[in-house]
């Protein structure tokens, strides 16, 4: 999954880093330390398959930075996994966490398998053995390195990981915090599933609320009535579409492998999802027009384009034909460096992946905190808040002699549940990060694009951390 034939994925991350580091004043040595991957663990282990044969599995875990502990980042199952890719993704996690002020170092893992080719039992054996290998080398633990879902993995795999870890570490009171993205019944947190899509929405909404930015793009302030095109109807694309629609925007096109559909009046993601489930295709959705190729959706006239599928989908070839004013990178690496240059020339604002899709890791942070505190969010304050609000309402109504409408009463009385607190924590995180990046860009107008401004934000935070930690003699 290299982003360019001329340099590897890790080199392309280094290139973006070097481009941004010119806008900082950090010592060259500190910058070199930040860029380097601290530990790379490459492993091979055997598994016995259902047919009795033995296969040797190739797998990795990379800890890019320990400037904060633990390291954090997903584990992907894909036959494209290789050391360079895992190193690049681990570095991106360091920068991602720094930008959204999540106190973790970056990490990433990968198992070089196509999960579709294995039975559930085989996948369980592979995941459990991988976890055991990590335990043996002290490469996993709530204070060491905390994996999470990524491409090809989900709550099921995370449940196998926590179970294996806990059984190898009897009595470890914080064992549940060794991995995030777990099912809620196994110590997961409510709100993790929709986290990345919701984070994408919060990030773009904040950009749309910035008057100077909207004026420059020739758009009105606010996300309401903006036209949105989304590529990918997986977890991230689906939830992005849902939150944009609920936020008053119009999702005019959706794209999947088999093609794309367009409706100027707006599409409902759930109806499209059900249509695809029933017919096996996104195409021929009632009231919508089919587009010949899924990539045609990327070139539609719209305000906001959300690539939420694969990497490198917008490149030097098709970027000149992109007509969106704002691109929100929900996927990892959907736009190549060549596309970035074209956008900068055309005045298109590209909101970068490593910050925009940080909703997943942000809510992982909340899950980890929940695991360490051993209590569900909202358990302590929900009743208290509701009782307090009831009293305030009673007083208000008796003093004014008027009564509040039923809908408002429900809203005011409601004490926070876990998902309310998780959503609000995510909203705060995305708004703060957007403002910090935009502030850096405003202070230094020679920074060419928002991606570079985001890198500058990350470098400053990680470098400050290293400088304050001191370097061992
Ligand atoms: N795999 C996700 C990412 O790349 C989530 C990582 C995490 O939650 O630790 O951001």
Image (tube, rainbow, N blue to C red):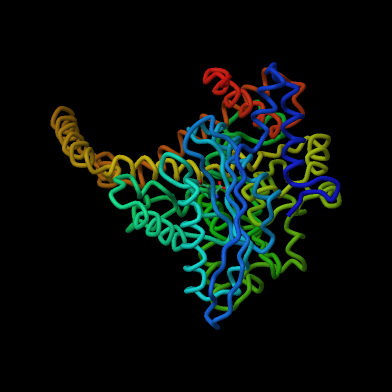
Please tell me whether residue 471 is drawn above or below residue 254 in the rendered image.
above
Is residue 211 visible in the rendered structure shown here? no
Is residue 319 visible in the rendered structure shown here? yes
Quadrant including the C terminus? top right
Residue 155 lies left or right of residue 227; in this view the side is: left
Where residue 92 sits in the image (x, y, percent)?
63, 40
- Nearest the eye: 92 or 397: 92
- Nearest the eye: 110 or 210: 110
User: In this view, which residue lies farthest toward the bottom?
Assistant: 51
Residue at 57% from the left image edge and 62% from the top image edge: 152
Residue 190 lies left or right of residue 302; in this view the side is: left
Where residue 8 sits in the image (x, y, percent)?
78, 47
Choose top left, top right, bottom left or bottom right for residue 415. Answer: top left
- Nearest the eye: 49 or 282: 49
Quadrant including the N terminus? bottom right
Number of marks in the image?
0
Please tell me whether residue 289 is drawn above or below residue 251 in the rendered image.
below
Residue 189 lies left or right of residue 274; in this view the side is: left
Residue at 35% from the left image edge and 56% from the top image edge: 184
Choose top left, top right, bottom left or bottom right for residue 222. Answer: top right
Where residue 378 sits in the image (x, y, percent)?
27, 42
Please tell me whether residue 80 is drawn above or below residue 462 in the rendered image.
below
Where residue 124 sits in the image (x, y, percent)?
47, 68
- Nearest the eye: 35 or 23: 35
Residue at 51% from the left image edge and 73% from the top image edge: 122
Residue at 64% from the left image edge and 49% from the top image edge: 86
């Amino acid at each position: 999954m290299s982003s360019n034939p001329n340099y590897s994925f890790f080199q392309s991350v280094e290139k973006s880093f070097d481009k941004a580091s010119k806008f900082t004043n950090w010592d060259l040595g500190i910058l070199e330390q930040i860029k380097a991957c601290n530990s790379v663990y490459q492993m091979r282990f055997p598994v016995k398959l259902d047919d009795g044969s033995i296969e040797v599995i190739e797998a990795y875990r990379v800890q890019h930075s320990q400037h904060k502990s633990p390291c954090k980042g997903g584990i992907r199952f894909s036959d494209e996994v290789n050391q360079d890719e895992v190193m690049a993704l681990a570095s991106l996690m360091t920068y991602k966490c720094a930008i959204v002020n999540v106190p973790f170092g970056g990490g990433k893992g990968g198992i070089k398998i196509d999960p579709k080719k294995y039975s559930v039992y085989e996948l369980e054996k592979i995941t459990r053995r991988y976890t055991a290998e990590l335990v043996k080398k002290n490469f996993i633990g709530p204070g060491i390195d905390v994996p999470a879902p990524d491409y090809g993995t989900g709550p099921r795999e995370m449940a196998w990981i926590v179970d294996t870890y806990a059984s190898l570490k009897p009595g470890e009171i914080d064992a549940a915090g060794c991995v995030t993205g777990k099912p809620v019944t196994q110590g997961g947190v409510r709100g993790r599933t929709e986290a990345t899509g919701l984070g994408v929405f919060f990030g773009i909404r904040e950009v749309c609320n910035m008057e100077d930015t909207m004026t420059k793009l020739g758009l009105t302030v606010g996300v309401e009535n903006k036209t949105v095109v989304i590529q990918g109807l997986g977890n991230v694309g689906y939830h992005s579409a849902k939150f944009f629609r609920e936020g008053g925007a119009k999702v005019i096109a959706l794209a999947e492998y088999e093609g794309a559909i367009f409706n100027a009046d707006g599409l409902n993601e759930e109806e499209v999802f059900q249509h695809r489930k029933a017919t096996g295709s996104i195409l021929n959705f009632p009231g919508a027009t089919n587009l010949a190729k899924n990539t045609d959706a990327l070139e539609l006239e719209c305000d906001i384009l959300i690539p939420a599928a694969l990497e490198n989908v917008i490149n030097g070839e098709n970027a000149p034909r992109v007509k969106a004013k704002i691109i929100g990178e929900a996927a990892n690496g959907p736009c190549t460096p060549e596309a970035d240059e074209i956008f900068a020339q055309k005045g298109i604002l590209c909101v970068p992946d490593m910050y925009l899709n940080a909703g997943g890791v942000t809510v992982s942070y909340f899950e980890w905190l929940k695991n360490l505190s051993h209590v569900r969010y909202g358990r302590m304050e929900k009743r208290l808040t509701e009782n307090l609000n009831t009293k305030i309402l009673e007083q208000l109504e008796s003093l004014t002699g008027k009564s509040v409408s039923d809908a408002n009463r429900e809203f005011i009385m409601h004490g926070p549940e876990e998902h309310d607190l998780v959503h609000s924590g995510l909203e705060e995180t995305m708004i703060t990060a957007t403002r910090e990046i935009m502030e850096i860009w405003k202070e230094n107008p020679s920074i060419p694009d928002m991606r570079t401004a985001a890198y500058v934000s990350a470098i400053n935070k990680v470098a400050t951390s290293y400088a304050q930690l001191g370097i061992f003699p």
